[in-house]
Amino acid sequence: MGEHPRQDLLDRFARGRLSLAETRAVLAHLVGGCEVCRAATAATWEVAPAADPSAGTASAVDVADRAADRAYDQVIDRVFWQIQQKDVALQREAAQAREIYDELHRHPIAHQLLLIGNSPRFRSRSLCELLLAKCHEAGFQDPRQAIDLGHLAVGVADRLPADDTPSEIVGGIQARAWAQLGNALRIGGDHAAAGQAFDSATALLDLDPRILPLDRARVLDQLGSLRRDQGRHGEAFRLLDQVIAFYRKLGQWHLLGRALAQKAMVCDEVGDVETEMVLLRQALDLLDPQADPRMFLAARHNLVLALSQSGRHREAFALMYHTRPLYLETGDRLNLVRLRWLEGSVAAGLGQLDRAEMAFREVRDALADLGLAYDAALAGLDLAGVYAAQGRRADTRRVAEEIRVIFQSLSIHREALAAILVFHQAAMQDEAEAQLIDDVARFLKRCRHNPDLRYLRRS
Amino acid sequence: MSALDHPEVEVPLEQLLERVRPRLKSLFARYRIPPQDTEDILQQALLALVYQRPNIRDPEAWLFGTLRNRCLIYWRDRRRRLYDSVDTVVLDWMAAPTPPEQEGADLARDLTRVVDRLPDRCRSLLKLRYGLGYEPPELAKHLGYSQTSISKVTTRCLAALLRQLTVAGLYKKGS
């Protein structure tokens, strides 16, 4: 069998770092069945212990020996110093980006795009990050502005200079910029353009396998929202499961909560209320209400609705009662209208039809006042449902006529109008039952973001 | 785990780095990454952290999740190199035995003995590869694998062979 190979040779063998001649010698020795060398290589072979390394501390784990400990310290010192220098530079760059953004923002959008195209001063990674954050925020308030900001972010991301920024960071921000633009286009209702933007984002992810999981998760998360709106629920579930796995692996609990809440929305779309409630409860346990009060409130709101839909009206009422302060804290009028709408739905579920009627009327008027005609018509449908339950046929006919006028004045797609006309016709013939009204209302909510949906009247 | 139990507090980078130092050493030791190889892994992970910090909710959890992933990639890369070398060496042994006759015969016999301890699927594949000199496309065709998966299957069989030579051998003495 010959002499045993030295330990360092066995270590390098396990790491694939020997020359072919050395590999040949070690392999010949091992093939011969040397138990001593098997024992020696066993330690180097087991690389991923079953126990979670993060659970231990240095005192709990045997760091091989003091010499190795010192060697680790030397490396760590060196890296820490370089990283701290980099962090200072990046903070400086972020401060500059805020100034550049203010300067850019003073110009009309066409001029902003021109500046980004022509002046290298505007091509900074920090500016791109800032634009992405602004684009995300604008998505909740002003979809048109969100699309402009998305185009700007893509313009900056695609022109980032080849400096010392690692390529996976650049690839990641480019993919996120395209995805953020796609998300803004989705919110604006342009699914075709959104799909193209996401094609660019996913092509960038495919191009560079080193792009970081957090960037990948963000892109897939937003793509999941598009697939949900498109009614491609299977794909939406698959994408969100990937996102959930990424966040879980990275210990990003708040983001995991967000992804679970997103998945719950897909469950709502497919009518799986039980799973929706399970996911929302998990999400609420993980979401950080201080850091993201809007998301926390949205998850609570959806849970109240799901409870109400599944007939658990008392639970819905209790949760709504405890959630009321959050609506009041957010303070904006639209959120207060949403709360009132929820109160109407829960009251209707509890059979308190007078309260429900009052709430739905207030909501309908407030939404019309805010210029949200589509939502006002939806609240009108809920009101018609209350009238139908009370047998107030004349009131149902009056509301049906109001809704028909609103929808015909809006440039909405054919199927939505068809659903409204089915309801209108039934109301005029005094045949509008609560079930039909509920079906039409649910369809109108879903088809708002998905013009490809077809309305099929339940037989 | 509840976010409410772990309120997010922005920790200065310097403080964060000193706090994670003991866990870093522990992690690298557990994954058996030698100090000289940790520099790249740690630098890449920390660079990504400072670049992505505004988007990261819990930097410490993120850092260790990322490092564990990079340690696994480190080993995957090294194992791939090792499998390539072993494949080349064994093919050389079988194709052109340069050692003296007796030594070559011993090696072939020992190798066959080790291969015989492997599961059927790997035994067939390695015997075709090293006994009859089949190339990957021929292996795929003969064993009914697709051309795209044969390289993965071969890698798994080489991994099984090496485990037999090292760790597994300790527990299967005389088998």
Image (tube, rainbow, N blue to C red):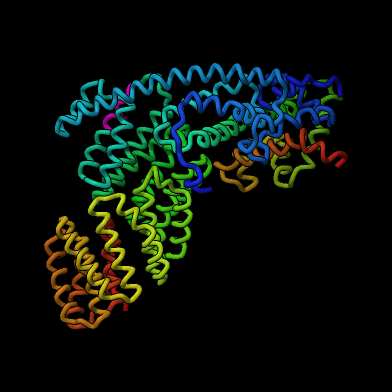
Question: What residue do we see at 28% from left, 77% from top?
Answer: A434
Q: Is residue B165 left or right of residue A434?
A: right
Residue A110 horizontal/vertical position (percent): 15, 33
For residue A265, above or below residue A247: below
Q: Is residue A352 left or right of residue A214?
A: left
Please state which of residues B118 and A331 is positioned toward the viewer in this rendering.
A331
Q: Say if the magenta span includes residue B113.
A: no
Q: Is residue A201 left or right of residue A369?
A: right
| Quadrant in the picture for the N terminus of chain A | top right
Is residue B83 visible in the rendered image? The answer is no
Question: What residue do we see at 48% from left, 17% from top?
Answer: A82
| Quadrant in the picture for the C terminus of chain A | bottom left
Number of marks present in the image shown: 0
Is residue A232 visible in the rendered image? The answer is yes
Please state which of residues A417 and B54 is positioned toward the viewer in this rendering.
B54
Residue A68 horizontal/vertical position (percent): 68, 20
Image quadrant of residue A360?
bottom left
Please state which of residues A218 and A56 is positioned toward the viewer in this rendering.
A56
Image quadrant of residue B84?
top right
For residue A426, above or below residue A323: below
Q: Say if the magenta span includes residue A159.
A: yes
Q: Which residues are magenta?
A: A154-161
For residue B157, above or below residue B75: below
Residue B90 horizontal/vertical position (percent): 72, 29
